[in-house]
Image: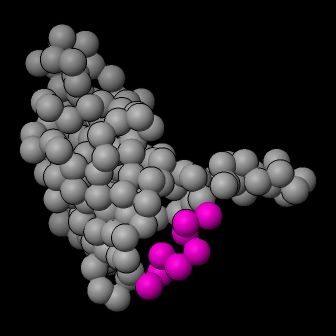
Amino acid sequence: MGEIRTELPATRNAGLIFIGRIRTPWQDRKACPRQGRLDGPLCRIELADPWGRALDGIEVYDRLEVLYWLDRSRRDLLRQSPRDDGRTQGTFALRSPVRPNPIGTSIVRLVAREGATLLVQGLDCLDGTPLLDLKPDRSVFGPLAQAGVRAGSR
């Protein structure tokens, strides 16, 4: 109620590559948490060939930033009511998965690496979600890191 949608443009210009899949316990949005927790359930990030080799050296980090494509999300809402209470807000003022470019991000705790698979905690996406990218948590590379303190590393 009160949501405003728009027609999507016919032209799309991003050539994204899905580098793997994310395995979580959640099959539908209602069961999926709104925000991941670093003490949440163990999830798997499975990289496809040849991307597993790009994980070399990742074990030194405690936390990673995971970027993923929310492939089952609507993309056409300008204003939305995520709690379905009649109050709406602009899409860019929310962390809702309903976005023009449904890119999700989570900071996760790296538990272990098993070849081309990472075991992590902290995700908030559905099982089978396409993986876009992985990066060490950005706080490792902030002002503290430049001063010689490696926040978030083991």
Q: Is residue 129 left or right of residue 147?
A: left
Of residue 17 and residue 57, the one placed in the foreground of this image is: 57
- Queried whether the magenta region covers residue 10, the answer comes back as no
Q: Is residue 74 left or right of residue 125?
A: left
- Please name the colour scheme applied to the rendered image: one colour
Type of secondary structure dominating the magenta stretch: helix
Position of residue 105 relative to residue 112, above or below, is above
Q: Tell me the residue at 18%/26% (across/down).
A: 3
Of residue 6 and residue 110, the one placed in the foreground of this image is: 110
Q: Position of residue 146 (x, y in %)?
A: 85, 57
Of residue 114 and residue 18, the one placed in the foreground of this image is: 114
Residue 101 seen in the current view: no
Q: Position of residue 68 (x, y in %)?
A: 33, 58
Q: In the figure, residue 20 lies in which quadrant?
A: bottom left
Position of residue 18 relative to residue 45, above or below, is below
Q: Tell me the residue at 29%/58% (across/down).
A: 44
Q: Residue furthest bottom?
A: 50
Q: Quadrant of the N terminus?
A: top left
Q: Tell me the residue at 44%/85% (across/down).
A: 53
Position of residue 9 relative to residue 56, above or below, is above
Numbered label tally: 0
Residue 81 seen in the current view: yes
Q: Quadrant of the C terminus?
A: bottom right
Q: Tell me the residue at 45%/48% (across/down).
A: 108
Q: Position of residue 21 (x, y in %)?
A: 24, 66
Q: Is residue 32 left or right of residue 89?
A: left
Q: Which residues are magenta?
A: 53-60
Q: Position of residue 94 (x, y in %)?
A: 37, 30
